[in-house]
Image (cartoon, rainbow, N blue to C red):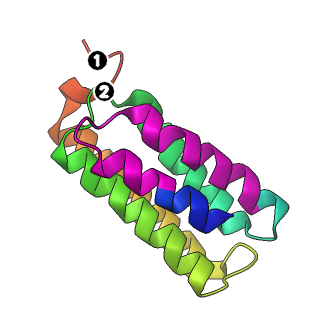
């Protein structure tokens, strides 16, 4: 099922008109599915992605790069069958993704909902 949602997320990105909802719904499904299927690390990563998507005003090129990093990370966790929380490595993955989001908003504060 996760592969289906990852593919759906890519379609949301690859469409000519990139819409947040095209990425948001699959991320929500991955968050829920990770928790149900012994992949809480996927749930954590998808939750961070949702938090990022919730505050993006417009999905620009740099924001899409971050979404792709989330996508790739989830795929690696699933193909590597990293069940559980992933230990120290899992924490490092989540922190790296959080850091990318923070740096994005430092450089593009105007693209954060509620800015100004």
Other-residue count near label 1 (Cα within 10 Å), few / some / many at <14 / 14–19 / ≥20: few
Query: In the image, is residue 16 part of the stretch drawn in magenta?
Result: yes
Report the number of discs: 2
Q: Nearer the viewer, residue 23 or 66?
A: 23
- Percent position of residue 107, x then y: 15, 41
> Most extreme residue toward the top, as rendered?
116
- Percent position of residue 69, x then y: 36, 64
Task: Reply above or below: 116 against 69.
Answer: above
Other-residue count near label 2 (Cα within 10 Å), few / some / many at <14 / 14–19 / ≥20: some
Element on which disc 2 rests? loop
Residue 100 visible (yes or no): no
What separation in Å lies between label 1 and label 2 (alpha carbons)? 6 Å
Q: Residue at x 51, y 61 (%)?
A: 6
Q: Residue at x 24, y 11 (%)?
A: 116
Residue 77's image quarter?
bottom right
Residue 115's disc number: 1
Viewed as shown, does residue 77 lie left or right of 84? Answer: left
Viewed as shown, does residue 54 lie left or right of 104? Answer: right
Q: Which residue does the numbered mark 2 point to in the structure image?
A: 112
Task: Reply above or below: 1 against 54.
Answer: below
The range drawn in magenta is 8-34
Task: Reply above or below: 72 against 61.
Answer: below
Q: Marks 2 and 1: in contact by CB < 8 Å? A: yes
Q: Residue at x 52, y 49 (%)?
A: 48
Q: Residue at x 44, y 39 (%)?
A: 22
Q: Quadrant of the N terminus?
A: bottom right
Element on which disc 1 rests? loop
Q: Main secondary structure of the magenta part?
A: helix
């Amino acid at each position: 099922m996760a592969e289906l949602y990852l593919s759906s997320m890519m379609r949301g990105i690859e469409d000519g008109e990139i819409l947040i909802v095209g990425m948001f719904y699959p991320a929500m499904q991955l968050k829920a599915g990770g928790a149900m299927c012994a992949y809480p690390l996927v749930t954590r990563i998808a939750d961070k992605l949702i938090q990022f998507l919730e505050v993006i005003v417009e999905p620009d090129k740099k924001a899409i790069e971050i979404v792709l990093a989330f996508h790739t990370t989830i795929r690696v966790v699933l193909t590597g069958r990293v069940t559980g929380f992933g230990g120290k490595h899992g924490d490092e993955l989540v922190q790296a993704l959080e850091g990318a989001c923070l740096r994005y908003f430092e450089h593009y504060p105007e693209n954060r909902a509620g800015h100004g």
